[in-house]
Amino acid sequence: MIIPKLFLKTIKRSGLGKNLFDEMRYDDAGAEIPDFVLNKPAYRNAQVIVAGDNFGCGSSREHAPWALLDFGIRVVISTSFADIFYSNCFKNGILPIILPPEDVDKLMDDAGRGANAVLSIDLESQTITGPDGGEISFEVDAFKKHCLLNGLDDIGLTMQKSDKIAAFEAKNATTMPWI
């Protein structure tokens, strides 16, 4: 549902946001469905999604987080996530937050305020501040937090060791020139 299969032909990370939740956002003629939440004026520029259980189920390809990110979503809050989707979010710069059902219900209720339903997520302090000023704490793996705070994906993590890689390559070229 996040990004339908017909849009999975690309290997580019950009351009998928327009088709995010395509089957729910648009009718058969391609016109927006006004009742879909992200088509409503108050939520068109949303950066946070508060979702139901097992968000991302069936969305094991990286295209799902790519589409969310391209649309502008930076955080997804749910009671649970599909494992591969959850991992792909971190690898692509999206923070998936797992909260107990009562906290998600509270945030869903807050979301009913429309344009006034602003949430602030502070990854450093691991808190969500709601429109009423109330705070909810959340847990996140320390390594994944470090990567998000520093904008590191798998390639970025590898490049942090570029001096060691270069030294290894230089030594290898000298000790095993036939390779």
Image: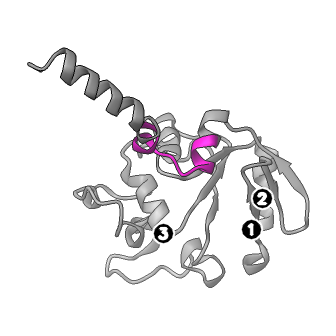
* Residue at the far top in the pictured view: 175
Instruction: Tell me the residue at 57%/41% (across/down).
Output: 81
Name the quarter where the N terminus is drawn.
Answer: bottom left
Q: Is residue 143 above or below residue 41?
A: above
Numbered disc 1: secondary structure: helix
Let me know if residue 154 is in the magenta part: yes
Q: Residue 48, image x and y in percent?
A: 64, 62
Numbered disc 2: secondary structure: helix
Query: Which tag, 1 or 3, sits closer to the chain's start?
Result: 3
- Mark 1 vs mark 3, foreground winner is 3
- Rendered image quadrant of residue 175: top left
According to the picture, the residue beneath numbered tag 1 turns out to be 111
Disc 3 marks which amino acid? Phe
Disc 1 marks which amino acid? Ala
Let me know if residue 43 is in the magenta part: no
According to the picture, the residue beneath numbered tag 2 turns out to be 107
166 and 126: which one is in front?
Answer: 166
Q: Residue 112, image x and y in percent?
A: 76, 71
Instruction: Tell me the residue at 59%/49% (across/down).
Output: 150
Q: Please rate how many residues cluster around mark 1, counting C-alpha atoms within 10 Å: few if below 14, some from 14 to 19, many from 20.
A: many
110 and 146: which one is in front?
Answer: 146
* Residue at the far left in the pictured view: 178
Instruction: Tell me the residue at 38%/48% (across/down).
Output: 62
* Residue 83 visible (yes or no): yes
- 152 displayed left or right of 104: left
Q: Residue 66, image x and y in percent?
A: 41, 57
Q: Please rate how many residues cluster around mark 2, counting C-alpha atoms within 10 Å: few if below 14, some from 14 to 19, many from 20.
A: many
Disc 2 marks which amino acid? Leu
- Using the image, tell me which numbered label, if any, was put on residue 71: 3
Which region shows up in magenta? 146-158
Cβ atoms under marks 1 and 2 closer than 8 Å: yes
